[in-house]
Every structure is written in C-alpha cells, then in structure tokens.
C-alpha cells in the first residue's frame, strides 16, 4: 500500500525496521544471509510492521517506538512464508524465485527455522511480560492453524467453520496481535488495545479470503502462483467450499482429490471455470466485505486522530486489492 504524503513519518518508521532487519540478518553466514536479505528487499507490503507502528500512535507518543517488536513480527511472518512456499510448491513469490527453488526444501526449512529463532531472540530483549504472553499464545495458535490446514488436505467434507478457524489461527491472529502489541508497547489503554486487536482480526480474516479468491483469477500470477494452486494442492478454500454445494461439482472435486492424493496429475482448468460460473467468487467477496465492515466499526470506536483515517484507508485498499 502506498502511504499518503501526510503519513511520511510512517515511511521513516518502516525504513528503521528494515534497517534493523538487515543489520541482524547481515551478520549470519550464507546461504541464510542471502536468502533472508532477498525476503527483506523483495518489495513485501510490510502489513504487520506497518499496523504495529500505526497502532503505537494510539498510545503515549512520548514512549519509544516499537521498532524491535515490529521487526519480530516481520521475522515470524517471513519464516512462515518460506515454510508455506515449501508446502505449496510455489516457484515464485512476488515475481522472485522462492527460497526452496533456489536451494532445496531441506535448506529452506532450516532457513525458515533460523528466521523464527532470530525473531524469538529479538523478542527476548523486550521486557514486557504481557507482550510475551500474547506473542507465545499467537505462535501456538499459528502452529495449530498450519497443522489444521495440513490435516484437512484432500478432505472434501471440510466445514465452513473449520475453514474460518484455520484462517483465524493461521492469518488473522498475527495481524490482530500486530495491532494489539503496537498499542501495548506505548501504554495505550486496555480498551484501545482490544479495539485495535479486533480491527486487526477482522482485517486479517478478510485478507485471507481475498487471497483465496485471487487463487482463482488471472491476477493470481502477480502472487507468483498458478491459477487454482490451492485446489491443485488439495486445499478447500472458500470459493470451492461454496461452489461444491452443487452435487456435480462436489463429486468432481472429490474425484480430483482422490487422484491428487495418489500422486496423479489432474487437469483442473475446466473445474476452475465451473467453480467461477457458480457465483462462488462473488459470494466469497461478500464474506470478505462483511469482515471489512466489522473492521470499520472497530476503527470508528478509536480516538479521532490522523492514524484513524489511515486505518480506514487500509480497509478501502484491502477491499480493492488484486494482488
């Protein structure tokens, strides 16, 4: 997201976070150093650090800025990206060759583990018991979300409830906590911390649904993925869950999953086209918009200051996101 001119101080904040990340990661040996710096400089949106910094301005502005905390959140996110790309067999991320493609799955796994450990090391320097409690609980839920996704692979009878629970644990919680911890770091009131947490939660739920929608569109190529990649990997996301209410599509996807789980190659283009023709994409956008509307309600509860308007702009940006 391109920040408006009145928020240039946040650009400075993000540069400080990038500087901290590069300083930490430049000291490690290759190939971890090269791979890590690639992730830092590859043009990611920095959603979590940005939300952490924005939220910090709802506390006491005289407090030290939580650069270190924001860097921790980005390291954990970067680690999860490496592991996700391995699981998804993704050849590209943001148009750049993924780490496991450059090296191999085993090396990439260790690199992801290193970034995770580096995040924990940085977190250990932050002397705030409450922040540690929130952070550790989030990592526990993140792991549960990853495992739940893996366990549900090739399962046709997955419920909408389990899909949303996976999104909550795997995506929404880390975004929610990015907001909460930013406010906590600058001693914002408990009420503001909770409001920002729920804003981040609803934003994160919408964010993941949009990602799942983009998997079925040509614009998905901007993400460095093939159309229908989730379906090809055996994952039921919201568009497919809604589409397979049609019995013929249900049987077809069930057959695909059976073949894919047995290592067979399946042509999915026709099925993807049929899913799109059911109106499932449009219904999925309605789900996403509901979460964005809830996020907007939370923002409207925040004090009237310039950062509040930026959060509203972020909601509008996410509603139009096409990559």
Image: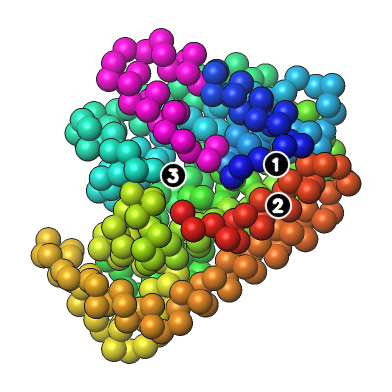
Q: Residue at horizontal 85%, vertical 28%?
A: 60
Q: Which mark is residue 143?
A: 3
> Which residues are drawn in magenta?
21-46
Give the CA separation, mark 2 to mark 1.
Answer: 10 Å
Q: Is residue 147 left or right of residue 264?
A: right
Q: Residue at horizontal 66%, vertical 50%?
A: 314
Q: Residue furthest front?
A: 5
Give the CA separation, mark 1 to mark 3.
Answer: 35 Å
* Label 1 Cα neighbours within 10 Å, binned few <14 / some 14-19 / many ≥20: few
* Label 3 Cα neighbours within 10 Å, binned few <14 / some 14-19 / many ≥20: some
Q: Residue furthest top?
A: 27
Residue 38 belongs to magenta span: yes
- Is residue 321 shown above or below 101? below
Q: Quadrant of residue 190?
A: top right
The x, y position of residue 184, in whole percent, is 74, 33
In front of the other: 295 or 311: 311
Residue 73 belongs to magenta span: no
Task: Give the secondary structure at mark 2.
Answer: helix
Q: Which residue is mark 2?
A: 313
First in sequence, mark 1 or 3: give its number: 1
Q: Which numbered disc, 1 or 3, marks the residue closer to the eye?
A: 1
Q: Is residue 68 left or right of residue 252?
A: right
Q: Residue at horizontal 79%, vertical 46%?
A: 308
Q: Which residue is mark 1?
A: 4
Q: Residue furthest bottom?
A: 247
Give the CA separation, mark 2 to mark 3.
Answer: 31 Å
First in sequence, mark 2 or 1: give its number: 1
The x, y position of residue 122, in whole percent, is 54, 20
Q: Quadrant of residue 285?
A: bottom right
């Amino acid at each position: 997201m391109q920040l408006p001119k009145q928020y240039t101080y946040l650009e400075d904040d993000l540069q400080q976070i990038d500087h901290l990340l590069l300083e930490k990661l430049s000291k490690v040996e290759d190939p971890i150093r090269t791979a890590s710096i690639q992730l830092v400089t590859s043009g990611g949106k920095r959603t979590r650090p940005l939300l952490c910094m924005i939220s910090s301005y709802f506390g006491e502005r005289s407090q030290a800025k939580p650069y270190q905390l924001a860097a921790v959140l980005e390291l954990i996110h970067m680690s999860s990206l490496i592991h996700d790309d391995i699981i998804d067999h993704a050849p590209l991320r943001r148009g750049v060759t993924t780490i496991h493609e450059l090296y191999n799955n085993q090396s990439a796994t260790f690199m992801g583990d290193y970034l995770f450990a580096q995040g924990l090391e940085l977190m250990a320097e932050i002397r705030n018991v409450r922040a540690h409690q929130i952070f550790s609980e989030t990592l526990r839920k993140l792991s549960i979300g990853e495992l739940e996704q893996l366990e549900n692979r090739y399962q046709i009878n997955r419920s909408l409830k389990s899909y949303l629970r996976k999104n909550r644990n795997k995506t929404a919680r880390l975004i929610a906590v990015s907001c909460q911890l930013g406010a906590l770091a600058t001693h914002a009131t408990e009420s503001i911390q909770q409001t920002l947490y729920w804003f981040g939660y609803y934003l994160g739920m919408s964010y993941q649904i949009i990602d799942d929608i983009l998997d079925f569109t040509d614009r998905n190529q901007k993400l460095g993925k093939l159309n229908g990649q989730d379906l090809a990997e055996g994952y039921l996301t919201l568009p497919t869950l809604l589409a397979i209410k049609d019995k013929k599509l249900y049987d077809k996807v069930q057959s695909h999953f059976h073949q894919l789980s047995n290592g067979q190659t399946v042509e999915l283009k026709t099925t993807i086209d049929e899913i799109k023709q059911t109106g499932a994409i449009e219904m999925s956008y309605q789900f996403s918009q509901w979460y964005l509307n809830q996020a907007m309600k939370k923002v409207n509860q925040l004090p009237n200051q310039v950062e509040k308007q930026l959060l509203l702009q972020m909601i509008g940006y996410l509603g139009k996101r096409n990559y």
